[in-house]
Amino acid sequence: MLRRLLKHPRVMHYNRLIVLVVIVNLGWAVYGATGGNWWTSQHTDLSAIAFMAQTNLAAAVLFRQQYILNAAAWLATRAPTSWPLQVRWALGKYYHLGGLHVGTAVAGTLWYLVLATSMICDAVAGVGDASGANTIFVATLATTFSVMVVMALPRLRAAQHDRFEITHRFCGWTALILMWINTLVVINGDRGDRSFGGAMLTAPAFWLVVASAGLAIWPWLLLRRVPINCARPSSHAMIVRLDHRGIPPVGTTRAISRHPLVGWHHFANVPAAPGAAGYRMLVSRAGDWTSEFVDNPPTHVWVRGIPAVGVANVRRLFSKVVIVATGSGIGPLLGHLLDTSVPAQLVWVTKNPRLTYGEGFVEEIEAAQPDAIIWDTDALGKPDVLQLAYQAFVESGAEAVICVANRIVTEQVVHGFEQRGIPAFGPIWDS
């Protein structure tokens, strides 16, 4: 009963990390309200509250940095397959670290709301020394962060992804500018007899804003416009070849866009076909952006940042895995299927694979995975994916399961296996 509860999607590691961050911040709030004396009838310790807000938001930016996430993935997958299965299972959840980003972003927003409310209450009570300009800056920041949090709510983000992306990006940059102005105004007001430069260099808030700005700007310093070659095996899919600045590691993804300020979408990096240079991406028709891409492919795309480690890299923790894909979910898994360093049993459920993705694409998979189960739904109908995958798991002697499908099927497969005490991994749609 307890295992079934802990393996429920709502109690996944991602959400546990969010709750952990909230609990830690609640602990600090309790301390501030009691022993810390942050709120008294004569005085509010605005600097302590501001420090909590800025620390959380700097952490939120940090936990979205691909260098940090890639390092965590690398470290987690160093564990040898001789370690206990439960330990490797837990380490394989490294891709849930986005929960720390969400938790600290929400906590930072709440602290800014507390800060703005405290400043307004002090002004009404005639206590405190916060300037009117500072209060307006903080209230504007709290509102900006609140809009970002609301737009990032899972259902709203899924229904309005383009608006979420635009809001997150432009509100984020606006907030960063406001934080700079507000921090410098506060430092100038509190410096006393010290020089402005000296006060600035010794203020923790200044260095938190510097860190936040640096982390936010860094990926954009790697922005590049690169040429691509496109091959369309069917009206459903496009195989895109890129050749620039080296080949990304197997199992990574990269964001591309037709326009650098909006419309960023992540696709898996797959080694080029034998004899070809560069690497490939599989773009399948799944929405307005991908449909436009397939119908009217560009000659160039924008890339930024560094390749990000994907979920399927967890295979390195196990002696053998079952890889489950439906439709174009084969794209993020293709690099792992071609790299046979970890034995795998493929279960691919898709519509007429040779017609949809091309003879060469399917033959490449079959050459690397001769025992692959490729279920053609046109010929065989739609199967029970969980049952099909479980049968393959039992017969193959694998230790774990990796599934990339649509959200409903992925959650059914991952939840279904984990309830049986079998390690299972799949995307969590946190971006």
Image (tube, rainbow, N blue to C red):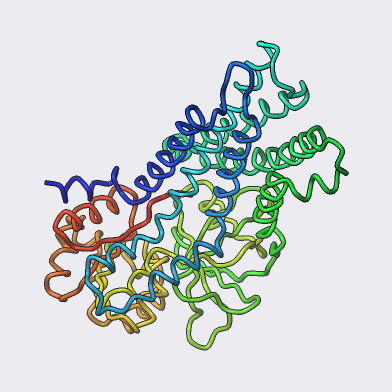
**Nearer-the-camera pick, 89 or 349:** 89
In the image, taking residue 245 as reference, residue 78 lies left or right, namely: left
Q: Quadrant of residue 85?
A: bottom left
**Nearer-the-camera pick, 431 or 161:** 431
**Nearer-the-camera pick, 287 or 70:** 70
Residue that extends furthest to the bottom in the rendered view of this protein: 275
Q: Quadrant of residue 120?
A: top right
In the image, taking residue 377 as reference, residue 224 lies left or right, namely: right
**Nearer-the-camera pick, 63 or 353:** 63
Asked if 125 appears above or below 415 in the picture, the reply is above
Q: Position of residue 402 (x, y in %)?
A: 29, 64
Q: Residue at x 23, y 51 (%)?
A: 412
Q: Position of residue 227 (x, y in %)?
A: 67, 69
Asked if 108 appears above or below 354 in the picture, the reply is above
User: Does residue 211 appear in the picture of this structure?
Assistant: yes
In the image, taking residue 215 as reference, residue 330 lies left or right, namely: left
Q: Residue at x 37, y 49 (%)?
A: 14
Q: Residue at x 81, y 38 (%)?
A: 191
In the image, taking residue 217 as reference, residue 199 lies left or right, namely: right
Q: Position of residue 47 (x, y in %)?
A: 65, 34
Q: Residue at x 29, y 42 (%)?
A: 10
Q: Position of residue 296 (x, y in %)?
A: 59, 56
User: Does residue 143 appear in the picture of this structure?
Assistant: no
Residue that extends furthest to the top in the rendered view of this protein: 125
